């Protein structure tokens, strides 16, 4: 069985993330979407909220599970016995950053963790979680960026309707 991890902060999950999840779920027998618990970031949603959001969003994808982790991805991947990490790329600037992480993960895992890059679908190339949060904080329309139920949760966080 081939399995992969799609790690990220997912704060919040966007339609771009969901696009990568759907596409990766067709490539692998088992896909674990895992929320990084990064104490250094000031997140809009708690780890538990993000896990629940992703579980709701992926409930119709039977080979997708949602989890969370803290620490190094290579340690988490070793614990789960998964050897492939999936990462989405929007632009060349993403590639430079993600390539460094992929190479570091491969080094730290002694070659046991490889990274597969999926380029974003064009309709989501502009999306970023930070952009969604900024738009929502000013009451902007984020409906083209996130699932409807996620938009509602984000607006609640910012006390917008």
Image (cartoon, rainbow, N blue to C red):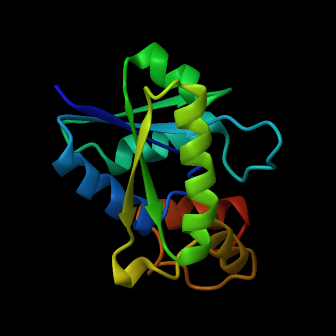
Residue appearing at x 25%, y 58% in the figure? 23
Residue appearing at x 42%, y 67% in the figure? 16
**Residue 160, x across and y down, in percent:** 68, 73
Residue appearing at x 44%, y 32% in the figure? 113
**Residue 76, x across and y down, in percent:** 53, 22
**Residue 74, x across and y down, in percent:** 55, 27
In this image, 71 relative to 30: left or right? right
Looking at the image, residue 126 lies above or below residue 93? below
Residue appearing at x 63%, y 52% in the figure? 100
In this image, 26 relative to 4: left or right? left
- Residues 66 and 114: in front is 114
- Residues 66 and 93: in front is 93
Total tally of numbered discs in the picture = 0
Q: Quadrant of the C terminus?
A: bottom right
Looking at the image, residue 151 lies above or below residue 49? below
Looking at the image, residue 46 lies above or below residue 125? above
Looking at the image, residue 92 lies above or below residue 41? below
- Residues 117 and 159: in front is 117
Q: Quadrant of the N terminus?
A: top left
In this image, 148 relative to 107: left or right? left
- Residues 86 and 158: in front is 86
Q: Quadrant of residue 4?
A: top left
């Amino acid at each position: 069985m081939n399995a992969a991890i799609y790690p990220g902060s997912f704060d919040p999950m966007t339609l771009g993330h969901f696009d990568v999840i759907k596409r990766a779920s067709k490539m692998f027998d088992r896909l674990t979407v895992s929320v990084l618990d990064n104490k250094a970031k000031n997140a809009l949603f708690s780890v538990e909220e993000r896990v629940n959001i992703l579980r709701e969003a992926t409930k119709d994808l039977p080979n997708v599970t949602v989890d969370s982790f803290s620490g190094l991805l290579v340690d988490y991947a070793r614990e789960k016995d998964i050897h492939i990490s999936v990462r989405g790329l929007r632009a060349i600037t993403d590639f430079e950053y993600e390539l460094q992480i992929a190479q570091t993960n491969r080094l730290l895992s002694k070659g046991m963790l490889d990274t597969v890059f999926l380029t974003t679908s064009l309709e989501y190339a502009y999306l970023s979680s930070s952009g969604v949060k900024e738009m929502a904080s000013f009451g902007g329309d984020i409906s083209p960026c996130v699932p409807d139920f996620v938009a509602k949760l984000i607006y609640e966080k910012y006390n917008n309707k």
